[in-house]
Image (spheres, rainbow, N blue to C red):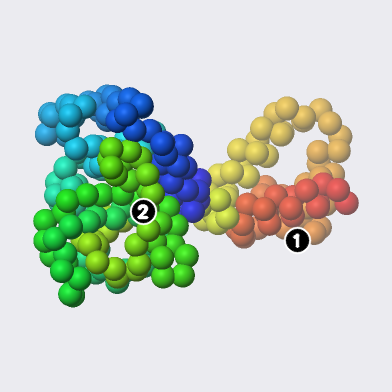
Amino acid sequence: MTETELRQSVVDVMRGWLGWTEANGKFRRIIDLYNTQNPLPRRYPVKYSDEWCAATVTAAGMAAGLQDIIYGECGCGKMIALYEARGLWVEDDAYIPSPGDIIMYDWDDSGLGDNRGNPDHVGVVEQVVGGTITIIEGNKGGAVARRKLAVNGRYIRGYCTPDYAGKAEEDDDMTQEQFDKFMDNYLARKAKEEASQPWEQDVIRRAKEAGISDGRRPRSPGTRVENMAMVLAAVGK
């Protein structure tokens, strides 16, 4: 998946939980998911009576299959420490977040300068339009619900920024080594499966004449789409 798709997967989980509340009992599913971690962060199972905003962010990462980059915690301060230790904590209130970033709040923020107080609450950025951030939070009035804030607005403590880019699988580019291995495997498989077909050598000859093969593999890596297009073009001649 691309970075954008990974970010969106977390947002989609949070959207799917909108309307889960303490009143209807669905919030318990979030806490139950959080408590399946083994080992549990700080070996503490979250209770239904506990604050559950940070547990919601953690559970969303788990549901999206991203628990290796969305670090498990049930406390805001401890969650910040996990990201800070990896250089993924942004202290600047004026930072413009992206969907999937994790926003921390401090309700004691005076609104003057960058807030440095203790974090009180957390949510996942859903989108940023103009200067307005839309966030989805667990335990917002006892529910999973949305909040809107201005970029650099009051109460922003900072942002945890999971390494989605490092997790993403780049589908467009491949190295020479990756391309050579791919084509060696492909040609070896085709040779084994279709060695009896007289047109196989003709395909290789046509690829060689087209200047995209040395008789073993097409030359120079580009994108997957470009390389496969060249091979198919040679076959089709």
What's the amino acid at mark 1? Gly
Q: Provide the residue designation for mark 1.
A: 211
What's the amino acid at mark 2? Arg
Q: Provide the residue designation for mark 2.
A: 147
> Residue 24 appears in which quarter of the rendering?
top left
| Percent x, y of residue 206 | 83, 52
In the displayed structure, does residue 108 sit left or right of residue 102?
left
Tag 2, which secondary structure?
Answer: strand
In this view, the residue in front, 162 or 100, is 100
Q: Which residue is drawn at 67% across and 47% down?
A: 216
Q: Which residue is drawn at 63% across and 45% down?
A: 183
In the displayed structure, does residue 181 sit left or right of residue 32?
right
Does residue 194 appear anywhere in the picture?
yes
| Percent x, y of residue 34 | 27, 30
Name the outermost residue toward the bottom: 113
Foreground disc of the pair 1, 2: 2
> Residue 72 appears in which quarter of the rendering?
top left
In this view, the residue in front, 163 or 13, is 13
How far apart, in angstroms, are the residues tagged by discs 1 and 2? Answer: 58 Å
In the displayed structure, does residue 201 sit left or right of residue 39?
right
Q: Residue at x 81, y 41 (%)?
A: 201
Count of numbered marks? 2
Q: Which residue is drawn at 55% across and 56% down?
A: 173
Q: Which of marks 1 and 2 is nearer the N terminus?
A: 2
